[in-house]
Amino acid sequence: MHADASARGKSVSQPANLSSEQLVSLYRTMLLTRRLDEKMLVLLRQGKSFFHIGASGHEACQVAAAACLRPGHDWSYPYYRDLAFVLQLGMTAEETMLCFLARAEDPNSGGRQMPAHYGHKKLRIVSQSSPTGTQFLQATGCGLGALKEGKDEVVFVSAGEGTCAQGDFHEAINWAARERAPVIFFIEDNKYAISVPITQQLAGASVYELVRGYSGLERVQVDGTDLEASFAAMQRAVARARSGAGPSLIVADVVRLLPHSSSDDQRKYRASEELEQDRQRDPIARLERRLLEAGVLDRAALERIQRETTEKVEAAVEWADSRPHPKPETALDHLYPPSPKLTPPAAPDPEAEPVVMVDAINHALMEEMERDGSIYVFGQDVAGSKGGVFTATRGLTAKFGEERCFNAPLAESSIIGVAIGMALRGLKPVVEIQFGDYIWTAMMQLRNELAMMCYRSSGAWSCPVVVRVPVAGYIHGAPYHSQSIEGFFCHVPGLRVVLPSNAADAKGLLKAAIRGNEPVLFLEPKGLYRQGYARAPEPGPDYVLPLGLASIKRTGDDISLITYGTLVQKSLEAAQKLAEEGVEVEVIDLRTLNPLDLEAVLRSVRKTGRVVIAHEDTLTGGFGADLAALIADQAFEWLDAPIRRVAAKDVPCPYNWFLEEVVLPQTADVVAALRDLAAY
């Protein structure tokens, strides 16, 4: 083993202080892992399950790592090959078989995920997913939360060496090292990412060398087939993390004794000689020799443990196979966690001081942070006297300190991933992505992690992150400061989408988003931040507007005009124009797109028989397409004319103001659609 805290490559050796009893106990877990692997492959051939990914060859370093942690106190983000790790931490053979057989009582996912996607609330094993590398930033967020709460918790996160080519890996190490977070990055290097060798993955073919430049990160390389060496390395890293000294990266050199998964055949890309060399490094055979040579066990005792282990696996399989499958009627459950039921508040005092939207958002954040000490605000440029590029977070650092309102690195995936890790431990992150146009590097964390966490864990984990995002155009922002993104995110199950049109709604809806348990994408039309027509009398600190309630901005009997965000004012202007021509238009501001107040829409449609949908997003793929389909499906017999849509043209928003006016929908476009429909 060699270790290095400052990129000097200093060699260090440490003996493991494992007793004979500990060695035998760890051997039992390693052997149990191997026998479970073998049994799962038998069950696969019997058609009992449909996927397997093995730990064989990784057992020694995994049990060593878990043996150094405190189950239920420390946090774990294991990857799909970590069967030995979760068993040593406390997951039972029965629970792992429930997972493999996708049964209802499976604590990992209740049958919602493939086998080996581990999660166990009691043991603080956070629900894991198929995308490789997303766990790194979440672990860093969890460690950051431990620092902020003053807890002596350690966060373990593991992966294979191939995943270290992911950007999230480097972003996580950067943030963890900068903050001295108590995170252990545990890389199990078996030299292959499915079929791609490490020489084709990483510069220098070495994870250890790849992270040399991260100041504050201790690096350790160890023979991962050596139980005692692995234990010593992990013990050192845990002590370092728990003492506040910062993160460590352990690279465990292991062997992959099985193909990548049951869908792979490694004989297609690995020579038989290489496979035999790996078998010669089998960590179980190595430990057995060690136990026999040291006199810890004799051959009879070893064989007795082997028989007992086989019997234990057979019993676990028999029991798990007798347990029920999930009921079909539960397939739609747990998309969202339970949230407090909110009562619609009384209208704000019309005599209250008017406030612009950006200040209403700022005041909502200020009031909620004062109410709830678990709220943390972070993002790019949000801290200090600047308070964000639009000043939405101005004054928060001055009032609550840098511990609760702080700047994040210039990395959107980092912001969302770290927020997820903080939320999973019970904190309430309210983060800002500076512009909607730059949210796309965080798409994996948003789509596959934040939105999926509750469903994939069968309701065991909730992730109440609020993501504030300035969006949309009408500010001469050009293609990269004008994008409307709600059409994309309304197609993400598990993610709430809010888009207010005025200051009072923005304040009340943001408070509701913060007080709920669901992940919320809170989209703020930056063109309305300081618009006079978006000003409103400011509601008080107790004004909390439930999500999913549309607002009727103007009543009418002839046409229903459904809109939201920046198009609300243009729709009201168009409705006034039509009123002068004898056509009464009902204008509905949706306010939230998910949840959608569909009943309010249908009530209006049944009354008018004619519908125009207006929004700033593009026509193709915009939210109006889905809304039109819902109306056609559920109110077709009430329609007297085709549904019309007014939206941006299907091109990027240009910078030149004359070109921008052509691309983005204008009041005249809404008027034309209303006239066309009135004359139908």
Image (tube, rainbow, N blue to C red):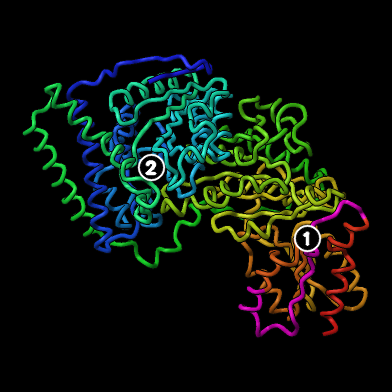
The amino acid type, in three-letter code, at marker 1 is: Glu
Q: Is residue 502 left or right of residue 196?
A: right
Instruction: State which tag comes first along the sequence, 2 or 1.
Output: 2
Q: Residue at x 43, y 47 (%)?
A: 194
Residue 274 picture quarter: top left
Q: Is residue 428 visible?
A: no
* Residue 637 among magenta residues: yes
Q: Relative to the observer, which residue lies in front, 572 or 213?
A: 213
Give the vertical position of 619 relative to 544 (above or below). below
Q: Residues within 10 Å of mark 1 (few under 14, many from 20)?
A: many
Q: Is residue 317 left or right of residue 639?
A: left
In the image, the segment drawn in magenta is 629-657
Q: Which disc, if any, is residue 616?
A: 1
Tag 2 secondary structure: loop
The amino acid type, in three-letter code, at marker 2 is: Lys
- Mark 2 sits on what residue? 121
Q: Residue at x 49, y 24 (%)?
A: 247
Q: Residue at x 8, y 28 (%)?
A: 298
